[in-house]
Amino acid sequence: MSVQSVLSFGVGFISGWAARSLADTPEGVGVKLLEVGIGAKDKVERWARVEGERLEDMLAEARARVPQETSETNGASKGASNGAPRRAAREAP
């Protein structure tokens, strides 16, 4: 047996041992995937909550502006027509 053969065997044995130590069992891989999935779910839920609050704020602001805008438009049209009812453009005989 030559020195090269012994060194090759030693390097192969050590690298195989290291690879086996670093590799997880199938159960460990499954647990790791579930952990990643739960983390992603939490991030998506947090994002959805923030965006939901933002949407609620936008809707509240829009609802608050609606009566103001309609009263401004009604006031402008009442002033122009002096409160008289509108007549149809074409009246039937």
Image (tube, rainbow, N blue to C red):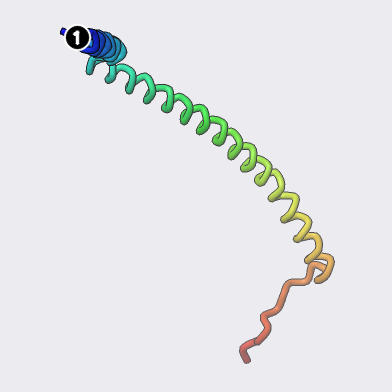
Q: Which quadrant would residue 89 be assigned to in this image? A: bottom right
Can you say whether 55 is above or below 74 in the image? above
- Which residue is painted at 81% across and 63% down in the image? 76
Q: Nearer the viewer, residue 62 or 85?
A: 62
- Which residue is painted at 59% across and 39% down in the image? 55
From this viewpoint, which residue is outermost toward the front?
2
Q: At which x and y percent is residue 78?
A: 80, 65
Crowd rating for badge 1 (residues with CA inside 10 Å; few <14, some 14–19, many 20+): few
Q: Secondary structure at mark 1?
A: loop
Residue 20 visible, this angle: no
From this viewpoint, which residue is outermost toward the left?
1
Can you say whether 55 is above or below 22 in the image? below
- Which residue is painted at 78% across and 71% down in the image? 84
Residue 44 visible, this angle: yes
Q: Which residue is mark 1?
A: 2
Q: How many marks?
A: 1
Can you say whether 92 is above or below 39 in the image? below
Q: Quadrant of the C terminus?
A: bottom right
Q: At which x and y percent is residue 54?
A: 61, 36
> Is 91 left, or right, of 69 in this rendering?
left
Q: Quadrant of the N terminus?
A: top left
Tag 1: amino acid: Ser
Q: Nearer the viewer, residue 10 or 38?
A: 10
Q: At which x and y percent is residue 43?
A: 48, 27
Q: Nearer the viewer, residue 92 or 42?
A: 42
- Which residue is painted at 45% across and 24% down in the image? 42
Q: At which x and y percent is residue 61?
A: 68, 42
